[in-house]
Image (cartoon, coloured by chain):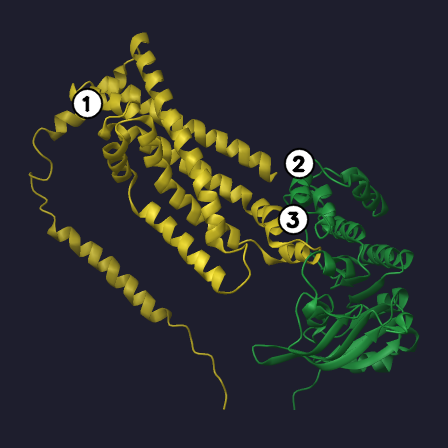
Chain colours: A yellow, B green
């Protein structure tokens, strides 16, 4: 009896792809392409928003407000991500299961840690914020916790996978040099996974800035709060100043991240 | 244990190992005396790597026993106990590229250091003198604080030997140590490896592709084919006929 390998079934997958593309195309037919698609005032509103970009609010007084709001948002983001790292890293190590050899205890600790991480990240930071504001009132602590918990869930999950995906050869060599699992974690896994983990941590820091700005919906100071105030008065020139400040913060973190990673990798 | 001096440092008895039903090592037996240098020869897929991993205690036999210094490898505790008996180097990818050379070398001490000392060493290298001596021996002292991934393949292999020097095991197991090096560098590396073993009376077991290097640097050669020992001879007694038998390709009938 000869075992002839079966040809991979690319045909079926290709057909599915075609069907899906067709479905997306057909869905365009259900859009009412008439004059009601954009509401009547929409065009002129977009016009005034774009025109405001030419006269961005740059008065010293408003720049001071913007700078202070950006500083507030940045502080929330830094505190939130720091706490998220402190919670997410140990949980991620447990969830990766690399500290325990096989057996029931290993499975149990992995399942429990993964469940906690999933619970933390499956609730959106705005929902956490609402919960904490109800529970402990509108304090900076409520905002920081609301940022830190879901971010810890996301970071922990990604860190766990990064620690598992480390190549086996250097670990095997460290083991044969007599390293225990915990020494292996520090000398091997964390060291090798560090650039990826740092890169992802920085990316999450950018996201935290965005989230911290959005927290104005629960009444917190910062860039989001100022944007809301200016929006209420339809002062688009101020909104632009604040949005540019937000983007500048994100770019700043991006630049810092590439600099740190370059130093680490090269 | 009355004849301690006669006890072989490595004793492999009827050891067999299978991977997903396919026998990589058929039941085979041999012993190696302390201080002996043994080359393992054989075509690709003959089971050399499996045999070396068994000898280094990285894997354990499905049946039979592998004993190092009188202890079955399956019963050796991980950590210091096993690390002082046997150390291994592989053809490459053996080091942590992101760590500096000094930490890769000092990783040879991880079996002896406690946890706190191991962690502290990453900030302030412990037993630095040992690392310096070892790196001087392999000719890389000036690279002490360089990132390991910046070193060439041959240099990294010498860092791995420096780590073995610091680990100071009684048996060195080298799996294809020169497979990824050009002929000149391969000779240099084997000169280094065999002198490191000779100086300290260590036992050396290495798998090789080149029979010339085997005759030059080793006392004894074990020929492996399809997981079985085809010959086990002093290197002087190797001749063309024996080697042709080992490497000839079977013509499908």
Task: Say which quadrant the C terminus of chain B sits in.
Answer: bottom right
Residue A235 as seen in the image, left or right of residue B104: left
Distance CA(mark 3)–CA(mark 2): 16 Å
Distance CA(mark 1)–CA(mark 2): 52 Å
- In the image, residue B23 sits, relative to residue B140, either above or below, namely below
Tag 2, which chain? B
**Picture coordinates of residue B97 (x, y %)?**
65, 46
Label 1 element class? helix
Seen as rendered, the residue at the extreme front is B2
Give the residue pinned by disc 2. Answer: B123
Residue drawn at point x = 58 percent, y = 47 percent:
A192
Residue drawn at point x = 68 percent, y = 70 percent:
B74
Task: Say which quadrant the N terminus of chain B sits in.
Answer: bottom right
Give the residue pinned by disc 1. Answer: A231
Label 2 element class? helix
**Disc number placed over residue B96 in the picture, else none:** 3
Nearer-N-terminus badge (3/2):
3
Q: Specify few, some or many for label 2: CA neighbours under 10 Å numbering under 14, 14-19, or 20 or more.
A: few
């Amino acid at each position: 009896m000869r075992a002839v390998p079966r040809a991979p079934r690319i045909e079926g997958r290709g057909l599915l792809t075609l069907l899906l593309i067709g479905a997306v195309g057909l869905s365009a037919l259900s859009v009412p392409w008439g004059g009601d698609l954009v509401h009547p005032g929409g065009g002129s509103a977009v016009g005034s928003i774009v025109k405001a970009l030419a006269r961005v609010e740059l008065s010293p007084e408003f720049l001071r407000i913007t700078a202070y709001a950006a500083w507030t948002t940045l502080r929330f983001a830094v505190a939130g991500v720091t706490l998220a790292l402190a919670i997410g890293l140990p949980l991620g190590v447990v969830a990766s299961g690399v500290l325990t050899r096989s057996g029931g205890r290993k499975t149990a600790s992995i399942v429990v840690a993964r469940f906690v991480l999933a619970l933390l990240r499956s609730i959106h930071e705005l929902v956490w914020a609402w919960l904490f504001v109800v529970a402990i009132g509108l304090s900076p602590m409520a905002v920081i916790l609301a940022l830190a918990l879901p971010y810890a869930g996301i970071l922990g999950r990604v860190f766990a996978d990064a620690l598992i995906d480390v190549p086996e050869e250097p670990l095997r060599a460290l083991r044969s040099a007599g390293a225990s699992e915990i020494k292996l974690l520090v000398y091997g896994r964390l060291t090798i996974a560090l650039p990826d983990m740092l890169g992802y941590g920085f990316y999450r820091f950018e996201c935290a800035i965005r989230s911290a700005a959005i927290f104005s919906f629960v009444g917190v100071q910062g860039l989001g709060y100022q944007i809301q105030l200016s929006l209420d008065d339809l002062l688009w020139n101020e909104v632009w100043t604040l949005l540019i400040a937000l983007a500048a913060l994100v770019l700043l973190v991006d630049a810092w991240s590439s600099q740190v990673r370059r130093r680490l990798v090269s | 244990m009355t004849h301690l001096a006669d006890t072989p440092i490595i004793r492999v008895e009827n050891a067999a190992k299978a991977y997903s039903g396919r026998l990589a090592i058929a039941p085979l037996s041999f012993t190696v005396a302390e201080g002996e240098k043994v080359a393992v020869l054989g075509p690709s897929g003959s089971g050399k790597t499996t045999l070396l991993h068994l000898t280094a205690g990285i894997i354990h036999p499905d049946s039979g026993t592998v004993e190092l210094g009188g202890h079955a490898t399956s019963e050796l505790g991980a950590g210091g106990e096993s690390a002082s008996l046997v150390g291994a180097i592989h053809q490459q990818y053996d080091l942590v590229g992101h760590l500096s050379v000094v930490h890769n070398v000092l990783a040879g001490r991880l079996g002896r250091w406690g946890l706190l000392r191991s962690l502290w060493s990453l900030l302030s290298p412990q037993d630095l003198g040992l690392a310096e001596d070892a790196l001087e021996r392999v000719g890389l002292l000036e690279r002490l604080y360089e990132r390991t991934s910046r070193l060439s393949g041959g240099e990294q292999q010498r860092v791995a030997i420096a780590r073995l020097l610091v680990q100071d095991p009684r048996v060195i197991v080298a799996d294809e140590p020169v497979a990824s090096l050009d002929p000149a560098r391969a000779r240099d590396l084997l000169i280094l490896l065999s002198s490191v073993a000779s100086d300290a009376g260590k036992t050396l077991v290495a798998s090789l592709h080149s029979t010339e290097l085997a005759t030059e640097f080793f006392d004894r050669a074990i020929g492996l084919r399809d997981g079985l020992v085809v010959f086990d001879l002093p290197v002087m007694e190797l001749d063309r006929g024996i080697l042709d038998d080992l490497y000839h390709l079977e013509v499908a009938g």
